[in-house]
Amino acid sequence: MSSVEQVVEGGGVEGPFVGAIDDGTTSARFIIFRAGTDDIVCYHQIEIPSIFAKEGWCEQDPKVIVSTVNECIVGACKKLKQLGGQVKDIVAVGITNQRESTVIWDRNTGETLANAIIWLDNRTTSTVEELLETIPNNARNINYLRPLCGLPLSPYFSGVKLRWLRDNVPTVRKAMESGDAMFGTIDTWLMYNLTGAQNGGVHKTDVTNASRTMLMNIETLQWDDNLLKFFGLPRKILPEICSSAEHFGDISDGVLKGVPITADLGDQQAALVGQQCLAKGQAKATYGTGCFLLYNTGPSIVHSQHGLLTTVGYQLGRKSAPYYALEGSVSIAGAAFNWLKDNIGLIQNWGQIEPMAQTVDNSLDVYFVPAFNGLYAPYWNQDARGVICGLSEETTSEHIVRATLEAVCFQVRDILDSMHKDCKIPLAKLMVDGGMTVNQLFLQLQSDLVGIHVLRAKISETTALGAAMAAYKVVEPRFNMEAPLSKSGPREPITPTINSHERDLRYKKWKMAIERSLNWETSTLAQGEREAFDGA
């Protein structure tokens, strides 16, 4: 594992500070912020290896996740001391995490019963098929549970992963039947271990993470007996559902012993908070391995009719109203460039992407649909596969790189169009963050191909910032989460440079490429499911 230990020059060393644990798909980090601001004092980051035991599988060792997070905490606190800061001035810690990833362990020993199944793991396609067969009247409707949980049946979500573990790992089934099993998403697993594990560790999650399991009722914000019955899972394995900002427990050991954990949000919801999209009608996009768009719908639940997910955006305190969101997920965004680099050798490193794409004026009518494991929102079509359309004798590697940037932009337009149809309010601007946003050409293409203003976050760590903001709000109720966090002034918008006619013409060809990506793995989708996607 490689690590990054960073000091932000000029960040200052005077408290109070807030720490944020950010466990992502490929790495974990602990970031120390000056409380109530977006000023990063220092951080420590370590990569977490994934295990690919079979095609389509993606696992991580839960013990490695915990040890990596603890190492990040120690590393960042060491750097804080070197700056002259005091660890005792860290007044609270927030957790943000990769969502849906599933951990199960023994409540008596604290030992895991299987590796964590990571959110993008696709092994549960067969489990989805089996569950569809149990739907009354042979309906095979993937949206059967949407009125209860806001989500379609998909390999993506924790409830399906738990059912797979129950059916395929004998030790898990036995522990579930005996009442010895405990389940958690990554936030729950980390919190359990940080607060003492089998020696008094808390077993809790928050509404944002629980809303991604398919086991929580989207209205009551509690575990739902009908959903548990459908998946054949016992209630006893489940953690307590809390708000996103409250006192979850105290860290029991180590350099942060006694520091309260006061926030817990899934990574995309944390980015919504970190981008300060705290009012109805605001939206953000985070570009990483995948791309995730969240549109704040306020206290109202909007059940999408156009292929989006209904999820909890955040609940900032037990007595506060929950705010909901529509979410669209793109499974392959930055990961497409990893494919260009690692699989076909078209680029050697990420630093080449923008210069290569800038050497050509356009993609020369090349369209790349990176549906390596199917398409997520708004299509939810697991039988799609990747295609590159429009190749000619004049096509170069530079055109394909540019087409890959545009592919992310077109997928974002797919989702924003669906959000518009569901909410009837067109977005005027999109707040963006994540690794891909360092690419200025990409942001210009995003603005051009969607036709809205794009505003990049002042810092790249908006996910961790959201967790830190929520954590500080608990210990300092006077903190105004909607006030400016930065002293560097407002963000400069990136505006469209092409007209609507050109934009729509190119989007029409993108839709043609989407059509060509469908129906490659027809054995994984029955006709009834395919019909459910019509009009998405």
Image: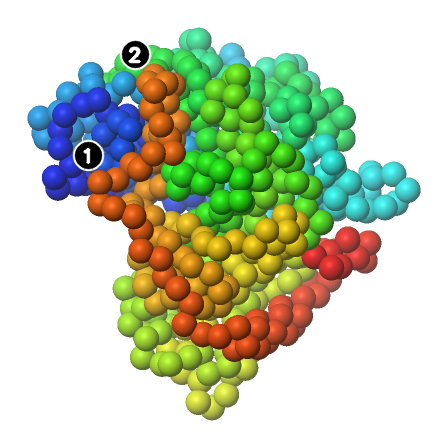
Task: Tell me residue 98's x, y (percent).
Answer: 46, 38
Total marks shown come to 2
Taking 213 as reference, is 200 left or right? left
Disc 2 secondary structure class = loop
Which residue: 66% across, 23% down?
220
Task: Give percent across and percent down for residue 245.
Answer: 44, 22
User: Mark number for residue 41?
Assistant: 1
Instruction: Using the image, determine if residue 446 lies above or below residue 222.
Output: below
Residue 370 to residue 390: above or below = above
Q: Find out whether the residues at labels 1 and 2 contact each other: C-beta distance under 8 Å.
A: no
Residue 177, given in percent of the width and then of the height, sits at 68, 18
Q: Quadrant of the N terminus?
A: top left
Could you tell me which secondary element the residue under label 1 belongs to?
Answer: strand
Q: Nearer the viewer, mark 1 or mark 2?
A: 1
Give whichever of 161, 29 is nearer the camera: 29
Q: Which mark is residue 258?
A: 2
Q: Residue at x 66, y 40 (%)?
A: 302
What is the three-letter code of the residue carrying label 1?
A: Val
Visible in this render: residue 31? yes
Mark found first going from the N terminus, 1 or 2 = 1
10 Å crowding of disc 1: few (<14), some (14-19), many (20+):
many
Say few, some or many: other residues with alpha carbon within 10 Å of mark 2 (under 14 / 14 to 19 / 20 or more). some
